[in-house]
Image (cartoon, grey):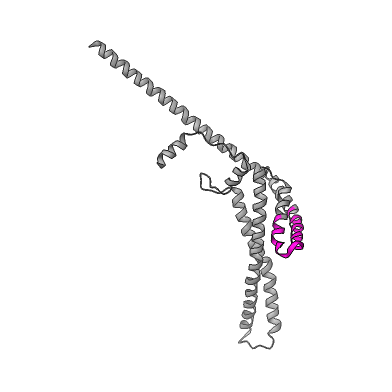
Amino acid sequence: MAAGVGAQSQWSRPAPPPQTGWERLSELWRRDERERYPEETVNIVKAAFTGGVVGWVYGGLPAFYQARKAFIDGSHGELFQNRADAVQSAHRAGLRSFIRYGWRWSWRVAAFVTIFNMVSTGLSVYRNKTTISNFVSAGAFTGALFRMHLGLQGLAGGFVFGTAFGIPAGGLLMIMQKLTGETLQEKRNRERRELYEQKLAEWQSRLSVTEVLGQTESNAQGGSETERARESRSY
């Protein structure tokens, strides 16, 4: 059964590139023939990881130095075995704060970056074009989502903050894409078109080969039937 389905898909005409926004969105989460996810999806994962690292450093380093300083200031009356013991105790206090507050900032920044990129990428893929309004809408949505637990005032504040964040972030991303000569969406459309043309050419080549083989087989059968007819008449 599987072999029959594979043979049928091999000889059927290749499917054209996605035409609607929903088809392009569903393609974001599907692997290609080489078992690779689209570049947009990979970029979302990379950005989430980078945001997590940046958030951890941003929240962890100040907490480390503050906790270390507070430990030193509050331990003048304590007795330590030696200077190395005191230094290690101060570092342990700083490390605990680094892990604690670094994690708090890490997951928040990673979640914000992930939601922002998913919304902006989804809008760009659905609309099949990259514009600053996609990033502004993504920033406003993400900011409002993160502050909605504070009520209407927090929702409005998050909306304004997200909008203000989306404008420079989107502008910077668009400038970086333009420097490469084409936007990510233009690159994706070009790759889809080239892949479809390649598959179509291969399909037409296989089709012409089968037609030639079929014609050759038909001629051979016709020749054998003519030969048998001659032999029957000779008898």
Res. 232 image quadrant:
top left
Q: Is residue 40 visible?
A: yes
**What segment carries the magenta color?**
141-166
113 in magenta: no
Which quadrant of the figure has residue 84? bottom right
Asked if residue 144 is among those painted magenta in the image, a careful observer would answer yes
User: Where's the N terminus, which quadrant?
Assistant: top left
Report the magenta stretch's main SS.
helix
The residue positioned 43% from the left and 25% from the top of the image is 212
Position of residue 69 relative to residue 79, above or below, is above
Question: Which of the two residues, 28 or 75, is positioned nearer the viewer here?
Answer: 28
- Give 230 or 47, whichever is nearer the viewer: 230
What residue is rendered at 40% in x and 40% in y?
3
175 left or right of 53 in image:
right
User: Where is residue 221 shown, x and y percent of the image?
Assistant: 34, 21
Q: Residue at x 75, y 52 (%)?
A: 167
* Quarter of the rendering occupied by the C terminus: top left
Asked whether the viewer can see residue 172, the reply is: no
Work out which residue is located at the far front of the displayed protein and give it.
152
Residue at 73% over, 48% down: 133
Q: Residue furthest top?
A: 234
Nearer to us in this view, 206 or 143: 143
Q: In the drawing, does residue 195 fall left or right of residue 127?
A: left
Q: Position of residue 125 (x, y in %)?
A: 64, 45
Q: Nearer the viewer, residue 54 or 189?
A: 189
Residue 23 coordinates in the image, percent (x, y): 59, 43
